[in-house]
Image: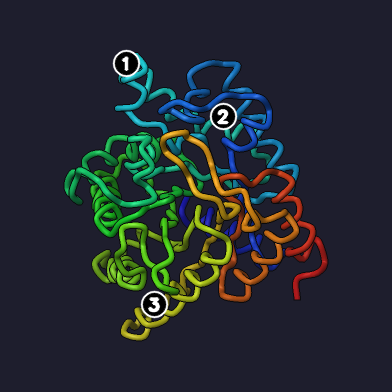
Amino acid sequence: AEVVAMERLEQVIARQGVALLDGGLATQLERMGESLADHLWSARLLVHEAGRRRIQDVHKAYAEAGANILTSAAYQASYAGFSQAGLRDEQIDDLLLASTSMCREVAGDCLVAASVGPYGAALADGSEYTGAYDRDADGLREWHLRRLRKLVASRPDFLALETIPSAEEVRGLLEALQVIRAEGDAPLPPAWLSMSVKDADGGVVLASGERLDEVVHFVCAQDLASAGRGRLIEILGVNCCKPALATRAIRIVRQAMAHAAAGQTSEQQERRIIVYSNRGEDWDPHSKSWVGTGPEEASDLEYAAEAKRWIDAGASIIGGCCRTTPDTIGQLSSTLTNQGGSLP
């Protein structure tokens, strides 16, 4: 499964020059009239048949806009969150499996990524933008493990470990993937790790304040520890930050990957870099809304112009996060892929 998914991704990049991810799921659901201001966010719609159809409508809209990879609605889906809403464990198992299968049903030629949101997303307190958690790496490993097992069993093409704000959570996730690989109940799909970052005096650090390059080095070091069993993380990058900050972050990621590779004799291809930013606003966990719609809010055209800088900086998989829509992805498709004819 891993080889097939990565081969298909490489074929897309060879054909188009860049692979396109989808955009904001919740943003499009809200545009369609859904109210998502509770602790389950878009995952709330997984519970009912009508909600699932709405989610599938969004998946289809992104596929039609030109996306090559669709991301499931599991970002805020967790055992704690759903049990708080009155669901039993077996029901939650089924919802996690369904989040992938319902995406697959409408994906057509698109690849399917199972969204693995951070611990902070399930807390619904905005801590994925700060990394201020009440669990260490061991606690985070155990918290992620149960959900990850079920998402791996759902057989997605990719696991999307996204908006991860701290080195502790990166470590917990990698350890959870190692446990699942050792158990061998289902093949481990290739994963991407996309981090939550912030500005720090002109530099870029993890949302927790930790150094981005050190986390990249840590991830790359796991290749050696894997002893020929393949990488746990195939793709690295950032998401849900301001568009211009993403450009600076990619340069750090690329440089850190090159530095890590310099000391290795691995013949594996350099990791692909993924980027999908928001529109430049800030998340307010109290109002559960995006604020700061001033001059920083990017139009789709401006977003595509910044995305061109991501490509120039080394990204080959790009898309949108919060506040982006199928129109945004359509703009990326028409201006930045070989399909649109204007990628240099």
- The C terminus lies in which quarter of the figure? bottom right
Q: Amino acid at mark 1?
A: Arg
3D distance between C-alphas at marks 2 and 3: 37 Å
Residue 188 picture location, percent across and down: 38, 48
Q: Residues within 10 Å of mark 3 (few under 14, many from 20)?
A: some
* Residue ID for mark 1: 88
Callout in the foreground (2, 3): 3
Q: Amino acid at mark 3?
A: Ala
3D distance between C-alphas at marks 2 and 1: 21 Å
Residue 123, placed above or below residue 322? above
Q: Amino acid at mark 2?
A: Met
Residue at image point 24% right, 55% down: 168
Q: Residues within 10 Å of mark 1 (few under 14, many from 20)?
A: few
* Numbered tag placed on residue 256 in the rendering: 3
Label 2 vs 3, first from the N-terminus: 2
Q: What kind of element bears circle 1?
A: loop
Q: What kind of element bears circle 3?
A: helix
* Residue ID for mark 2: 102
Residue at image point 62% right, 58% down: 296
Q: Nearer the viewer, residue 7 or 199?
A: 199
Residue 56, placed above or below residue 320? above
- Could you tell whether 210 is left or right of 71 in the image? left
> Which residue extends farthest right?
341
> Which residue extends farthest bottom?
262
3D distance between C-alphas at marks 3 and 1: 44 Å
